């Protein structure tokens, strides 16, 4: 296959999408592979030329070499450049919001206007559940001290790592 840069390869993608030109069976996969390898090098000139079909094909591709945050930024830029934020909002359903860092979600994504509060809430919920599975949360406060300064209840999470509480009454 010819060495084609990002602008041309996305035009070819447009042509070979369903309903487009008749092409050899092997061409679509070769074009998709080229899209995957050049997606991070795309500039505004290429993005503005994409139809919603191309944008959807890119967003729906499970094998892209790009983070969800970068993909969201690409979608946001596409919506602005094409003055089509309504379509970008619709296509945001392809972005795995729960794979985006919570700080980025609360700053860049939440303020974009492309996702609903319900989508954000679901992403935060999924992240919280995943965090809980990684680290069990202490169900009580501790340590608990009595009047003499000695420990009444130890903190099991600390003890299992060999951490001992210091008896401050003898200092």
Image (cartoon, grey):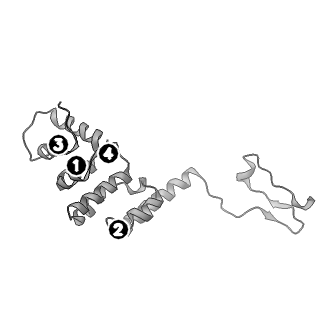
Nearest to N terminus: mark 4 or mark 2: 4
Q: Position of residue 73 (x, y in %)?
A: 33, 56
Measure the C-alpha gap from mark 3 to mark 4: 15 Å
Q: Which mark is drawn over residue 116?
A: 2
Please rate how many residues cluster around mark 3, counting C-alpha atoms within 10 Å: few if below 14, some from 14 to 19, many from 20.
Answer: few
Query: Which of the two labelled residues, at mark 4 and mark 1, occupies the earlier sequence position?
Result: 4
Disc on the earlier residue, 3 or 2 = 3
Would you call the spot at circle 1 few (<14 residues within 10 Å), some (14-19), or many (20 or more)?
Answer: some
**Quadrant assignment, res 142:** bottom right
Crowdedness near tag 2: few (<14), some (14–19) or many (≥20) residues, C-alpha within 10 Å = some
Residue at 11%, 45% in the rendered image? 15
Residues tagged 1 and 2 counted as in contact (Cβ below 8 A): no
Q: Name the residue carrying label 4.
A: 40
10 Å crowding of disc 4: few (<14), some (14-19), many (20+): some
Q: Residue under circle 3?
A: 8
User: Distance from label 1 to label 2 (Cα)?
Assistant: 22 Å
Q: Which circle, 3 or 2, is nearer the viewer?
A: 3
**Decide: marks 1, 3 in contact (CB < 8 A)?**
no
Q: Which quarter of the rendering shows the N terminus?
A: top left
* Secondary structure type for disc 3: helix
Q: Which residue is mark 1?
A: 57
Task: Tell us which disc is closer to us: 1 or 3.
Answer: 3
Disc 4 and disc 2: Cα gap in Å? 26 Å
The location of residue 101, given as percent across then percent down, is 46, 56
- Residue at left offset 76%, top offset 46%: 162
Earlier in the chain: of badge 1 and badge 3, it is 3
* Contact? badges 3 and 4 (CB < 8 Å): no
Residue 35 relative to residue 25: left or right: right
Camera-nearest residue between 67 and 146? 67
Of pointers 3 and 4, the one earlier in the residue sequence: 3
Marks 4 and 1, how far apart in space?
16 Å
SS for tag 1? helix
């Amino acid at each position: 296959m010819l060495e084609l840069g990002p602008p041309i390869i996305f035009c070819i993608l447009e042509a070979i999408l369903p309903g487009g030109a008749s092409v050899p069976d092997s061409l679509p996969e070769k074009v998709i592979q080229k899209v995957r390898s050049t997606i991070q090098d795309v500039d505004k000139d290429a993005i503005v030329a994409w139809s919603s079909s191309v944008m959807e094909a890119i967003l729906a591709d499970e094998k892209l070499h790009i983070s969800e945050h970068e993909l969201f930024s690409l979608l946001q830029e596409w919506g602005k450049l094409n003055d089509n934020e309504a379509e970008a909002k619709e296509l945001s359903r392809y972005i795995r919001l729960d794979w985006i860092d919570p700080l980025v979600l609360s700053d860049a994504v939440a303020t974009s206007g492309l996702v609903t509060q319900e989508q954000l809430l679901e992403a935060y919920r999924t992240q919280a559940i995943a965090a809980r599975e990684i680290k069990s949360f202490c169900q009580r406060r501790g340590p608990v001290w009595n009047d003499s300064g000695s420990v009444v209840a130890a903190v099991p999470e600390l003890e299992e790592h060999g951490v001992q509480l210091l008896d401050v009454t003898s200092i």
